[in-house]
Image (cartoon, rainbow, N blue to C red):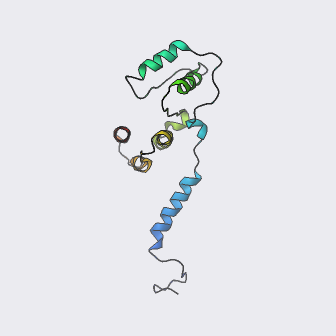
Amino acid sequence: MRFDGSKNPGRTHDDEPKLECDMRQMEQKQKQLVLEKITIPATRPRASRSRLLEVLRNNLGSCTATIINGRCGTGKTSLTADFAHQAGRPVSWYKVDAADSDLRVFIEYLLESLSLRRPSIDPDLLLQLTDYPSSDRASLLAESLVFQLG
């Protein structure tokens, strides 16, 4: 029996916060990301789109991120996978879909993708920012991420 009168000799009141923290960590580990969303497709396209690839190559000197948007079936994934294989530099891949409209889900995937190429990124710090109920948290996250990438 412990001094506080409880019958559980293996646990103390001091264990409660640690137990809650351990439980949260276990839940986070159990929550798996879909790796396909952050993995560059291995298959190469049947036809290379040289004009669009050239546009992407020319953008490398002036920007560090490119967003490609288009209707379903127009070849966005094929184009970007082809470019990623030819880029000659590290590429972070994140295929966004409707489920990623939740800020925390979006940031989890983005940070996982970036941390594969940039292990110095601290995802825990940035993920904490998604928990704040502020209306400008997306701006704060973007600013913090740019700072860590810098």
Position of residue 20 relative to residue 137, above or below, is below
Q: Residue furthest top?
A: 51
Q: Residue at x 47, y 67 (%)?
A: 18
* Residue 36 horizontal side relative to residue 69, left or right: right
| Number of marks in picture | 0
Q: In front: 103, or 83?
A: 83
The image position of residue 120, as x and y in percent, is 42, 45
Quarter of the figure with the C terminus: top left
Which residue corresponds to the image point at 50% horizontal and 27% vertical from the top-left?
88
Above/below status of 54 relative to 97:
above
> Looking at the picture, how far across and down is residue 17, in whole percent?
45, 67
Residue 3: percent from the left, percent from the top? 46, 87
Looking at the picture, does residue 30 appear above or below residue 104? below
Residue shown at the point (54%, 82%) measured from the top left? 9
Instruction: Please give the name of the residue rendered at 45% of the width and 76% of the height, measured from the top-left corner.
Output: 13
Looking at the picture, tell me which residue is in the foreground, 49 or 24.
49
Place of residue 102 in the rendered image (x, y in percent of width and height, measured from the top left): 49, 40
Instruction: List the single residue furthest toward the front.
Output: 88
Residue 59: image quadrant is: top left
